[in-house]
Image: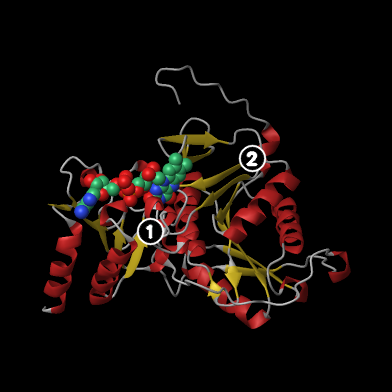
Amino acid sequence: EKKGAARRKPTFDPRLAEYRGVWVFVERDLSGVHPVSWELLGAARRLADQLGSEVGAVVAGVPEEALDVDSREAIAYGADVVYQVGHPVLAGYRNEPYSKLLCELVKRHKPEILLLGATSLGRDLASSVATTLETGLTADCTELAIDRESRALAATRPTFGGNLLCTILTLNYRPQMATVRPRVLPSPAKVRDRSGQIRKEEIELHEEEIVTKIAQFLPHVGDQVDLALSEVIVAGGKGLQKAANFALLEDLALALGGEVGATRAAVQAGWIDPQRQIGQTGKTVRPKLYIAAGISGAIQHRVGMESSDLIVAINTDPNAPIFEVAHYGIVGDAVALLPLLTRAVRGR
Ligand code: FAD
């Protein structure tokens, strides 16, 4: 928003007041619930408390027993009401039935805000739900708040290649939808004895009406790391000079019980698997320790790692932007320093 610019006065359609509550779509797959769902429930709780409304969670899939477990977890993470939909058609994610169930539930219960993870599944589902409901969707947010003047969701996301942050309000449409990347929001505390309600919802779904058929689930081949969940990351950039020097990062990561990450420049040089790219077009991480070796600290990299608890940067250039976000900085040659650090860690 331009500083000093006159703000457009929101015109409020009174029918929008029928919409109440902050909802989270709980993303589940064969391995369980994606942690971003719990992070979103933490944010939903804060937003709902400001609005004086309830937190709702949508838990859908099969089998019924697993849905019950996930619904109780959702309550422990902050949901007041869980809308549970069990149906054989929901075994394995497909856009059509999931989109239909979410649209039906929204029409039935009219939530004011609907949040999903900015994962592959969440991005696919959120966009089709927003299109069907003809409402606004702010994708890939890094911050969620309530705008004081309009009481609308203020969803902040990077724009212009990550150089600016913009805050988007959906004023005249409901529900206000947003997706948020994993690990951007803190995970809320789990309160086991929290009370909440589980409502089993019926949605008419028919296999013969669904165009997409699941033929087979194939395991992902290649690098399977989930950097978003790593507590220690040793990341490298173009300053490491060549692919072979990434072995130095692996040694240190192994000694620290962590994982190796990288910049886009290192990925584009073919030095490392794209799964390990951190930043705007890669993963967002929030480890306890982030070591950045030979990384300049471009804004597109920083947006993916700057909320790490402790950042240590090694760079030959004392003016490298990475030092602006680092808690500890070493000005020096990473190729020479990494083996010394590994030796020191191993000798502890
Ligand atoms: P460089 O910028 O080349 O920096 C290398 C650094 O290493 C320098 O600071 C140098 O001083 C230092 N150095 C050199 N030799 C040594 C040595 N021996 N020891 C220690 N330090 C040394 N980038 C990402 O990382 N992630 C993204 O998701 C991402 N998305 C992008 C999206 C868009 C739309 C755009 C336009 C760009 C994106 N980028 C992204 C690219 C980003 O702008 C930078 O180009 C990139 O992060 C730079 O990578 P780097 O730090 O490895 O390389």
| Front one among 114 and 287 | 287
Seen at 46% across and 63% down, the residue is 275
Residue at x-position 27% and y-position 64%: 245
Q: Secondary structure at mark 1?
A: loop
Q: Relative to 167, say whether 289 is above or below.
A: below
Q: Residue 285 shows which numbered tag?
A: 1
Question: Gap in Å between the C-alphas at discs 2 and 1?
Answer: 27 Å
Instruction: Residue 260: give x, y in percent of width and height.
Output: 34, 66
Going by the image, does 230 lie left or right of 338? right
Location of residue 298 (image quadrant): top left
Residue occupied by mark 2: 136
Residue that lies at the very extreme toward the right in this rendered image:
208
Mark closer to the observer (2, 1): 1
Question: What residue appears at the point 67 percent right and 80 percent down from the top-left corner?
Answer: 64
Q: Relative to 122, does residue 130 appear above or below in the rendering? A: above
Q: Nearer the viewer, residue 266 or 230?
A: 266
* Residue 171 pos. (x, y %): 60, 33
Circle 2 SS class: loop
Q: Residues within 10 Å of mark 1 (few under 14, many from 20)?
A: many
Mark number for residue 86? Answer: none
* Residue 218 appears in the rendering: yes
- The earlier-in-sequence mark between 2 and 1 is 2
Residue located 25% across and 73% down the image? 251
For residue 28, what is the image quadrant?
Answer: bottom right
Question: Within 10 angstroms of label 2, few (less than 14), some, or many (20 or more) residues?
Answer: many
Does residue 4 appear to the left or right of 32 in the view shown?
left
Q: Nearer the viewer, residue 155 or 219?
A: 219
Identify the amino acid type marked 1. Answer: Val
Report the amino acid beneath label 2: Gly
Q: Residue furthest bottom?
A: 65
Q: Quadrant of the N terminus?
A: top left
Find residue 276 and report its horizontal and vertical position in percent: 42, 62
